[in-house]
Amino acid sequence: MTFVDVFGDRLTALIAAIAVAYFLIALVPVWWPALHARRRRPRLPRPFLFVGTAAALIYGVSTFFMFAVMLPLSAVRIFLVPELDHAGVGYAMPLGHVSNLFYEHGWIMIVPVELVLTWYITRRLAGRWAHICSQPAANEQV
């Protein structure tokens, strides 16, 4: 069995480094709340539940954002822009460029969105986490 080196050593190492960096950035919604739960004084109660809740909120909000932005823009790109371009309407070209930008580069745009969401949701949730995990007061009979 022989190894065929297509890219060369430097380019292969660069591709591997970029893949590892993207993987670590994609997991920021998991490891940032975990670091936050460990470093915070006093420590957060139920840290594993905090990490899971924060990650679910971050991934859920970013997925909703992508569906709320990408789905209408994809529909515009597929259905509206060709018809407007065929009809000769002047604003079809800028609309097509914007929808193509989101269609082709949306996977890059999600990274800063997730980084900002990670910072914001972790900060807001950590401030309220002790209250969320505390037991409710017993109902007293009057």
Image (cartoon, grey):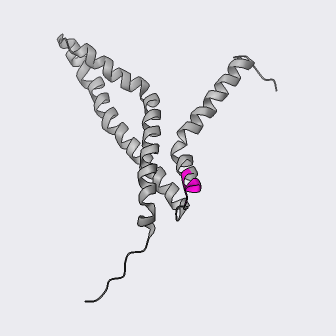
Question: Residue extending furthest bottom?
Answer: 142
Which corner quadrant holds the C terminus?
bottom left
Q: Please state which of residues 9 and 115 is positioned toward the viewer in this rendering.
A: 115
Q: Position of residue 88 (x, y in %)?
A: 18, 10
Q: Main secondary structure of the magenta part?
A: helix
| Residue occupying the point 52% across, 55% down | 51
Residue drawn where x is 47% and y is 38% of the image: 115
> Total of numbered circles in the picture?
0
- Give how far across and how far down residue 47 sits, in percent: 54, 60
In percent of width and height, residue 29 lies at: 50, 45
Magenta stretch contains residue 4: no
- Determine whether, in the image, residue 124 is placed left or right of residue 84: right
Q: Which residues are magenta?
A: 36-41
Q: Position of residue 136 (x, y in %)?
A: 38, 75
Q: Is residue 50 left or right of residue 65?
A: right
Residue at 74% in and 19% down? 9
Taking the spot 19% from the left edge, 11% from the top edge, the residue there is 90
* 82 sits to left or right of 112: left
Decide which of 102, 142 is in the foreground and name it. Answer: 142
* The furthest residue to the right: 1
What is the quadrant of the N terminus in the image?
A: top right
Q: Quadrant of residue 42?
A: bottom right
The quadrant holding residue 10 is top right
